[in-house]
Amino acid sequence: SPPLKELTGYNQNINGILRENFANNVDGDSSFATANSGNEGGVTGESFGQKQISSGNMVYVIWVQGDEDNTDLFLKISQDGGATFGDSINLSNNPASLSYNPQVVALGESVYIVWEDDEGNSGNSDVFFIKSSDGGKSFTDKRNLSDDPSGSGNPQLSISGNNVYVAWTGTSPDNTDIMLAQSLNNGDSFTVPENLSNDPEISFNPVLFVNGTHLNVEWKGQDDNGVTKINT
C-alpha cells in the first residue's frame, strides 16, 4: 500500500518509485531471486515480483528480472502440475526499460497478464496487457491500456467468463485517480479507460471483486489532511 509520500513521488517521477520498489522487492523475495538470478534471455540481475497461478494441470509462473536500469517480465509454464517447466519466455522484451508489478490470471488455456512498463521513458510508465489462448504457446502483441502521458501503474486484473477487467492508478489529467478498462470478448478489445474516482483526492490501491457479471471496485482515497478512507 503506497503511502502518500510515494504517491506524490509517483506523480513526479515514476522511475524513482520503480527503483525504490525494485530494491524493496528483491530484499523481500530472496529465495526466488537466488533461484533465478543470472541471465534470462540476455537480461542479467536479480528476480522479484513472482506470481504463480494454476488452471488444471497448467501452472504459470511470472516474475521480473534485471537491475535498476533494465528489467523484463518473464514467464515459465508447466503442463504437468509443476513437476517440470518449459523455457523462460520474455514477455516484455524491452531493452533499457523497466517492466514491473505483473499480475496474471488463467482460465483453461486462456492466460491474461498485465504489468507496468516505462518502455525506456524514465519519466513515465503505462499499463500493458497481453494474452494467450493456447496455454502460452503463443501470445498477442502487448497492448497499452492506459496510454497515460503522466504515468500509470499498480494494475489489477480479474476475469469472469468472457469479461476481462483491468484497473490501475493513473495520474492524468491532474491528480491520482482509479481507472478501469473492460473487455467483453476475452481481451480482444477494451473499452476506453473510465475514471472511477474522479475527485481531487489522491486515490490508490484498486481492488476488483467479480461475481458473475457483477463488478465492484474498491480503492483507497487520501485527502489533503492525510485522512484515508475506502471508496467504491
Image (cartoon, rainbow, N blue to C red):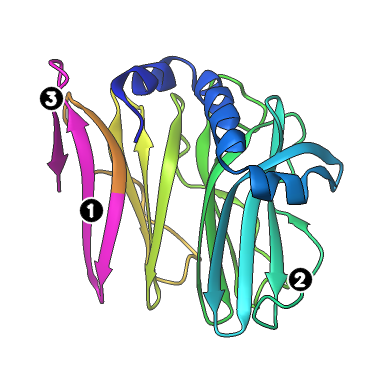
Q: Which quadrant of the figure has residue 5?
A: top left
Does 222 appear in magenta?
Answer: yes
Judge from the rendering whether residue 47 lies leftward or rightward of residue 190; answer left or right: right
Q: Which residue is mark 1?
A: 217
Mark 2 closeness class: few <14, some 14–19, many ≥20 residues within 10 Å: some
Q: Nearer the viewer, residue 187 or 78?
A: 78
Q: Which residues are magenta?
A: 207-232
Element at badge 2? loop
Q: CA distance from mark 3 to mark 1?
A: 20 Å
Q: Which residue is mark 3?
A: 227
Q: Is residue 4 visible?
A: yes
The type of residue carrying mark 3 is Val
Mark 3 or mark 1: which comes first in sequence? 1
Q: Which residue is mark 2?
A: 85
Q: Residue at x 59, y 34 (%)?
A: 27
- Residue situated furthest front in the rendering: 31
Mark 3 closeness class: few <14, some 14–19, many ≥20 residues within 10 Å: few
Mark 3 or mark 2: which comes first in sequence? 2
Q: CA distance from mark 1 to mark 2?
A: 35 Å
Kindly identify which numbered label has been placed on residue 17: none
Q: CA distance from mark 3 to mark 2?
A: 47 Å
Q: Taken as a whole, is the magenta stretch helix, strand or loop? A: strand
Mark 1 closeness class: few <14, some 14–19, many ≥20 residues within 10 Å: some
Mark 1 or mark 2: which comes first in sequence? 2
